[in-house]
Image: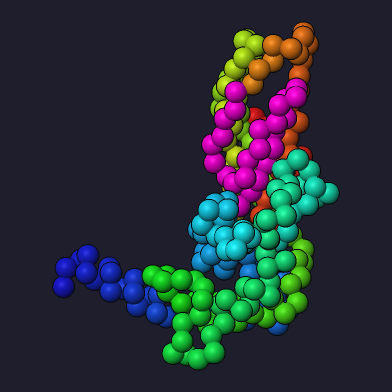
Amino acid sequence: MSLRSLIGALAIAAAACAPVPAVPDNPTWSDVEPILRAECVSCHGGSAAVTGSTQGVSYRLDFYDMSGESCGDAALIDGAIRFAAASSSQIAIDITSTSSAVRPRMPPEPSAWLQDWEWQTLAKWASNPRKGGTPVGNARPTIRITSPSRVVKKVFTLSVLLEDPDGESAVGALTIGDVTLRMDRPGAFSIVVDGSQWGLGRFPFRPWLATDGVAPLTTSDIS
């Protein structure tokens, strides 16, 4: 057996011996968010309006919920978007099968079925969709201005990068003067700013940030 084959065989054996996570007695959002992020958010995340919609409703499952009170200008206030807490009963229906031989509706092919502990955790949470507290060590997202480093023209392109150190979902908004750049997911964004009517003086940025619903934030450092 070659070294590569041996390493592959050992990796498979290690995966097969990994303990199966226990289903929590009273799961909260911090228990189900990692499952949704791994199995559902590729369709039901920031692109949900295109990839996670049915009958005019977008199911966005990377946030427990979102409101202007908790997320400020970063909130996606749109009646056509339904977040995880409001979608809990539909989640339970979609990931539960009436028979071991009948595939549940979600996730769709060619994705693999959810593991037993995954769908059981989701189903138990859906019966009482609690948010719970913020996990210890949950990092705050950041907005980083990538250009320009200083404004010397009245019309300029503002480019920023929204990042979450934990690799979780985040949304944000950055306001300067009368212009607001909204970010519906982590990544790079830009907007053309026309400050020709602003007059002289300093116009500070006002940031709003919200991470995946575990630790919503209303302010953050910008760099």
Question: Can residue 31 be seen by looking at this rendering?
Answer: no
User: Measuring 28% from the left and 74% from the top, which residue is drawn there?
Assistant: 9
Residue pushed farthest left?
A: 1
User: Measuring 63% from the left and 69% from the top, which residue is drawn there?
Assistant: 32
Depicted 18 relative to depicted 171: above or below? below
Depicted 99 relative to depicted 32: above or below? below
Depicted 83 relative to depicted 71: above or below? below
Quarter of the image that includes the C terminus: top right
Tell me which segment is drawn in magenta. 169-192
Residue 79: percent from left, percent from top: 72, 55
Tell me if 162 is positioned left or right of 112 in this view: right
Q: What predominant SS class does the magenta segment belong to?
A: strand
User: Measuring 54% from the left and 41% from the top, which residue is drawn there?
Assistant: 187
Depicted 113 relative to depicted 56: above or below? below
In the depicted view, which residue is nearer to us: 80 or 84? 80
Residue 75: percent from left, percent from top: 73, 47
Q: Quadrant of residue 17?
A: bottom left
Tell me if 159 is positioned left or right of 102 in this view: right
